């Protein structure tokens, strides 16, 4: 896949991951606010529940009391429960859900007791208030001397007082017993009869209603609802920690890591793309420079041969001596042949199909060594290529051929050697070409000094510089010579 | 220590102040959705809502007088009926119907639709009729943003209208707010109302309507199986003659009195209540005082009835 496509895909992925991340954050925020709302509501319900008990106590204690508060508290509790049940996060808190259902049931149960309590509270308050007043009224207005009767009244009044303030239903039988005694009285006097009836009625209301009053009041005050609510709060805060939120946090963490990974990938791709662009620019420049050098090669080589040939032709035209003419024509032929050979070499070096290292070495073997007049001198050539398919640029190929040629020419001209050994080695893209002879040798320092170096040597060094190769010359008088060219073959894209 | 004592005392004082009057004034304004209430008002007066198209909600809840039944023609089969409670201030009641079987106004409206003696119409029939009326379709779409009219939307609109049927600023509420004094007889009547224990059932914002109580606690009241008491729901003998305590607001306009419409005159109703539930025989003078107090509970007509 193209690098630019990869970058596009990575950017899109990063954008999607970022969007997902923010979506998850939003979900997390929603969950958190929902959890907070639920906790708040549970606490509110707890307060309302306590206030309800408080109101029940007040409404039993205070004679003139507004019952609205009780109803408002109850409907408020139900409203809060409905609000909580609408929160979706509860789905992941099954235990809380069960406890809330329990609490709702307990509250409904409590409400039933509240209704019973309200229905008996009013008559009990009224009768408990009336009885002492009636007794007083009787003593003031109706003159009655029956001590036993008066004692019954006092028994009932004081027992009602005791029962109401202790919520103890054990006193009810006692009240009933004394009321029955009152029922046994038959009065002729209408005032006394009316009084007796009223007193019996009120005492009856008390003793009939009191068991329900006591039971409903203690059921309300001892309801397990608050305990359930307390447990709900505890369980909810545990479930809150365990559920959903943790998963969401994990998810947003993973997304964040993925996002930064995508960003790192984009940066890496961009750096790589930049490198590739530079490399392309470099190789473009290299190609351009090589082209220049090849042109120069053509100009120098072919130009030199042709101008020499032209001079010779002029000389031949003016020459009258047939022997000299023959010699000059023969020289002319050599010059043109040499030019032609150079041209062929250049054309060969530019041939794309011949551009491998293996081909270059084969060319050296066949065309260079084969055509040179080396029959006077025994030579040996070793070739060891790790990868003969390595691609080599035209300039390098031409230079290798020319360097070998030049070295061998030098050996033949000056060295008086008995043997020449040529070795071409390539290992891990490192190419070493070595020409070794056992001739008379020379002082390399002398040769390498710019001014005194022969044309051939200077040329060789120039070629090496051109293609980034190192040139080593090892020699001492009468110890032969080694010329070694080594270079890295660059990878071609 | 002194600091805490002071705080404790403040708390006690605050509590004592709260314990003050057991009756609360009706608020002067109530929040309701005006559009819904307007739609509800239209429904309230529409006879199309009853199966035989003879009655509307307003036939039994006369909004031009007491908010309860004032003698409109209801068709032959609805004759044997109990007293309809007033719809005024009913939003302040803790339950609806005499035995409180509806938790709120919407439930009350829904139940009334299906009650044979009331509208006697099925949910489906009602919804079909409303959907067949282009005027209602448009109004409902406007309020509920739905193409189809649903039964719950109709009862919701009616309940919203009923929320607006509150009668604020009666003389007694202004007295509670310290804006007006009661006449001597009225004030004595209120004291008597408390002293005798009437207040133990008739308290709160609606002077009743906030608990279930039995009529005939001291001297039994005649029971009839047709009475819509709690016994009808629970079949518990102790629930015979047990009703939601009726509100005493606007009581002077709401004759005849009691669930069985037995008493025409308010004086008689007051005396009978004192006899049956307190075991007390009120003198003429005492009854007159209590009636004087009760007449201070007549508030202003609901504003929504004057609006278009």
Image: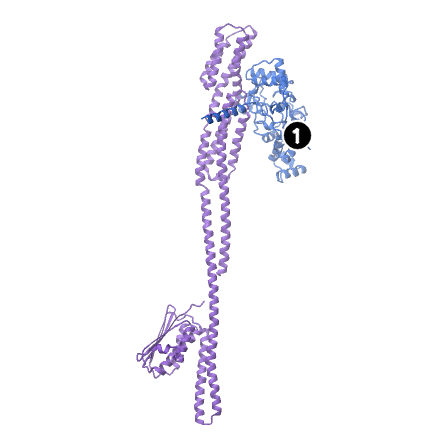
In which quadrant is the C terminus of chain A drawn?
Answer: bottom left
- Among the 4 quarters of the image, the one containing residue B69: top right
- Among the 4 quarters of the image, the one containing residue B184: top right
* Viewer-side residue, B164 vs B275: B164
Report helix, strand or loop for mark 1: helix
* Viewer-side residue, B148 vs B15: B15
Q: Count the labels in the image.
A: 1
Q: Is residue A213 left or right of residue B283?
A: left
Q: Look at mark 1 in the image and give the residue it sits on.
A: B303
Note whether B30 is above or below B220 in the view shown: below
| Chain B display color | blue
Q: Chain of mark 1?
A: B
User: Which residue is at the far left?
Assistant: A478
Residue drawn at the location 43% of the way across and 93% of the way down:
A323
User: Where does residue A254 sit, x and y in percent of width and height?
Assistant: 45, 49
Note whether A133 is above or below A263 in the view shown: above
- State which chain is coloured purple: A
Residue A89 seen by the camera: yes
User: Where does residue B215 sit, x and y in percent of width and height?
Assistant: 57, 19
């Amino acid at each position: 896949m193209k690098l630019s496509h990869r970058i596009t895909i990575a950017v899109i992925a990063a954008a999607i991951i970022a969007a997902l991340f923010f979506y998850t954050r939003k979900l997390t925020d929603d969950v958190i606010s929902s959890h907070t709302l639920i906790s708040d509501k549970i606490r509110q319900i707890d307060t309302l529940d306590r206030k309800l008990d408080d109101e029940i106590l007040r409404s039993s204690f205070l004679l003139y009391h507004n019952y609205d508060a009780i109803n408002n508290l109850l409907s408020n509790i139900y409203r809060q429960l409905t609000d909580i049940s609408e929160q979706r996060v509860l789905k992941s808190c099954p235990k809380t859900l069960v406890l809330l259902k329990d609490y709702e049931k307990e509250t409904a149960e409590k409400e039933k007791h509240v209704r019973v309590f309200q229905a008996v509270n009013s008559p009990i308050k009224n009768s408990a208030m009336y009885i002492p007043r009636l007794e007083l009224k009787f003593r003031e207005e109706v003159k009655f001397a029956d001590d036993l009767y008066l004692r019954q009244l006092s028994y009932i009044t004081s027992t009602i007082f005791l029962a109401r303030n202790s919520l103890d239903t054990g006193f009810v039988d006692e009240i009933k017993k004394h009321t029955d005694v009152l029922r046994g009285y038959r009065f002729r006097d209408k005032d006394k009869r009316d009084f007796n009836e009223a007193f019996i009625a009120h005492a009856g209301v008390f003793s009939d209603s009191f068991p329900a009053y006591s039971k409903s009041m203690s059921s309300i005050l001892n309801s397990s609802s608050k305990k359930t609510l307390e447990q709900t709060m505890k369980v909810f805060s545990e479930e809150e920690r365990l559920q959903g939120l943790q998963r969401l946090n994990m998810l947003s963490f993973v997304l964040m890591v993925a996002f930064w990974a995508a960003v790192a990938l984009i940066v890496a791709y961009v750096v790589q793309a930049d490198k590739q662009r530079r490399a392309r620019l470099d190789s473009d420049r290299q190609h351009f420079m090589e082209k220049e050098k090849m042109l120069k090669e053509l100009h120098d080589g072919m130009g030199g041969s042709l101008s020499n040939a032209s001079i010779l032709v002029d000389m031949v035209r003016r020459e009258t001596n047939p022997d000299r003419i023959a010699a000059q024509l023969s020289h002319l032929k050599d010059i043109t042949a040499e030019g032609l050979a150079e041209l062929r070499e250049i054309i060969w070096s530019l041939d794309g199909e011949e551009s491998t290292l293996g081909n270059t070495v084969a060319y050296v073997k066949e065309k260079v060594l084969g055509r040179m007049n080396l029959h006077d001198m025994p030579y040996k050539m070793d070739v060891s290529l790790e990868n003969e398919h390595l691609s080599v640029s035209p300039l390098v190929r031409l230079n290798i051929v020319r360097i070998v040629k030049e070295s061998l020419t030098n050996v033949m001209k000056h060295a008086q050697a008995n043997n020449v050994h040529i070795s071409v080695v390539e290992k891990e893209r490192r190419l070493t070409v070595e020409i070794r002879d056992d001739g008379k040798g020379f002082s390399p320092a002398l040769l390498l000094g710019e001014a005194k170096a022969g044309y051939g040597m200077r040329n060789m060094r120039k070629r090496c510089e051109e293609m980034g190769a190192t040139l080593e010359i090892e020699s001492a008088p009468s110890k032969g010579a080694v010329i070694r060219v080594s270079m890295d073959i660059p990878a071609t894209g | 220590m002194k600091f805490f004592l002071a705080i404790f005392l403040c708390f006690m004082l605050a509590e004592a102040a709260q314990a003050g009057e057991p009756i609360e004034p009706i608020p002067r304004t109530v929040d309701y959705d005006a559009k819904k209430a307007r739609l509800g008002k239209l429904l309230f007066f529409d006879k199309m809502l009853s199966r035989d198209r003879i009655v509307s909600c307003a036939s039994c809840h006369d909004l031009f007088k007491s908010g309860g039944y004032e003698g409109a023609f209801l068709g032959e089969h609805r004759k044997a009926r109990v007293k309809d409670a007033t719809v005024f201030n009913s939003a302040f009641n803790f339950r609806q119907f005499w035995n409180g079987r509806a938790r709120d106004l919407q439930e009350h409206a829904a139940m009334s639709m299906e009650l044979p003696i009331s509208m006697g119409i099925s949910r489906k029939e009602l919804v079909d009729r409303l959907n067949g009326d282009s005027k209602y379709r448009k109004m409902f779409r406007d309020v509920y943003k739905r193409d189809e009219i649903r039964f719950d939307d109709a009862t919701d609109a009616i309940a919203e209208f009923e929320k607006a049927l509150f009668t604020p600023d009666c003389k007694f509420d202004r007295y509670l707010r310290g804006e007006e004094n009661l006449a001597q007889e009225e004030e004595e009547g209120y004291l008597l109302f408390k002293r005798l224990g009437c207040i133990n059932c008739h308290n709160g914002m609606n002077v009743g309507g906030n608990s279930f109580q039995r009529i005939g606690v001291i001297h039994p009241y005649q029971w009839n199986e047709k009475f819509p008491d709690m016994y009808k729901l629970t079949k518990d003998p102790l629930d015979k003659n047990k009703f939601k305590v009726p509100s005493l607001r606007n009581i002077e306009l709401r004759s005849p009195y009691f669930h069985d419409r037995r008493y025409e005159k308010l004086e008689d109703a007051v005396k009978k209540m004192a006899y049956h539930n307190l075991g007390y025989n009120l003198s003429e003078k005492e009854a007159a005082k209590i009636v004087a107090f009760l007449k201070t509970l007549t508030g202003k007509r609901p504003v929504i009835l004057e609006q278009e």
